[in-house]
Amino acid sequence: MTKGAAKMNGKEKYRRGKRRRSSQKKEDAPKEKTVKDLLPSSPSKNPKWRKKCKYAPGPNRPSLLEKLRLRLSGGHFRMLNEKLYTCSGNEAFHFFKKEPELFDVYHAGYQEQMSRWPEQPINIIIKWLKSRSSSLVVADFGCGNASLARTIENKVFSIDLVSTDPSVIACDMSNTPLESKSVDVAVFCLSLMGINYHSYLKEANRVLKPCGWLLIAEVRSRFDPNNGGADPDKFSEAVKQLGFTLSSKDVTNKMFVLFYFKKREGAASMHKAIDWPELKPCLYKRR
């Protein structure tokens, strides 16, 4: 081998070694992560990502279609709820008479709202009724799914705008088919809706026997004068002028108030005008 060839081989070996060392350094150096590297390759292959990400699909999370359905249903409920609070009982009755299926939509939304309450006013009323004689005849104004009638042994006239059960009387609550002085207890559980709510109370007065009970449960905000609600004392005074005495008032619950009125014995029908306070609508905001 000539001297020149040996020199070339030495240079070639040096260059090859340098390339190998440079290549090794690149392999050993940490790679810079890209956005793609930071994202999981697949939700199904990464259970931790599924657990942390609120948008990850899963059996306990509603699908997009289900979310849209719930949102649409909630929108219908808010619309119907506002309708009931801002029209008369007669208008509401004929509205649902034309489209009774909307009543089911309303009550589905109502039940969903009630499920958030820590205590249900109807359960307190049921407890009150069970502590008294089962011979008392009850009229449930705005009965909904008639849960009161199914829970107690008393005879109950279940009244609402639409009959969801053969036992429910569908009518305008200001004009029921009940006979005068035929009822011992009249119940309004979150049902004083409508601009003519006082007409419902006048009807309850008509069907109640002397010394009969009038039980009213309403959303607390409707009787909060500091936030646009009615003065509860003025409301009580108006009911008294109708022919009742206020036996007691329960304001211990943060969601609702309960009034216990008793019809005066021998109370004559009131012909003079009563100054009924306006009860503000209980409207639900979009969440």
Image (cartoon, rainbow, N blue to C red):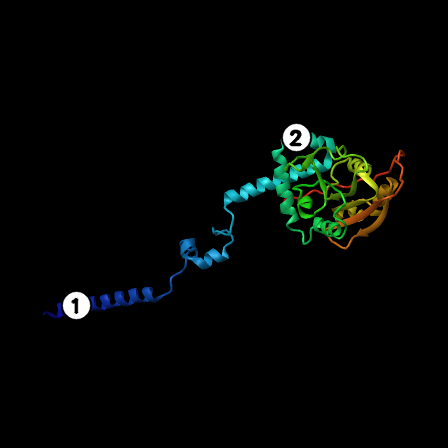
90 versus 143 height, above or below:
above
- Per the image, label 1 sits on a secondary structure element best described as helix
**Left or right, 59 with reference to 141:** left
Regarding residue 71, the answer to whether it shows in the image is: yes
Q: Which residue is painted at 71% across and 30% down in the image?
A: 91
**Left or right, 3 with reference to 159:** left
165 versus 248 height, above or below:
above
**Left or right, 285 with reference to 175:** left
Q: Position of residue 276 (x, y in %)?
A: 84, 39
Q: Which residue is mark 2?
A: 97
Q: Residue 75, labelled with which disc? A: none
**Left or right, 45 with reference to 109:** left
Label located before the other in sequence (2 or 1) = 1
Q: Which residue is mark 1?
A: 9
Q: Report crowding for label 1: few under 14, some 14 to 19, many 20 or more residues within 10 A (C-alpha).
A: few
Between residue 287 and residue 269, name the one nearer to us.
269
Regarding residue 287, the answer to whether it shows in the image is: no
Q: Position of residue 170 (x, y in %)?
A: 69, 34
- Per the image, label 2 sits on a secondary structure element best described as helix
Q: Which residue is painted at 46% across and 59% down in the image?
A: 48
Cβ atoms at labels 2 and 1 below 8 Å apart: no
77 versus 31 height, above or below:
above
Residue type (three-letter) at the residue carrying disc 1: Asn
Q: Which residue is painted at 54% across and 44% down in the image?
A: 67
The quadrant of the rendering that contains the N terminus is bottom left
Residue type (three-letter) at the residue carrying disc 2: Lys
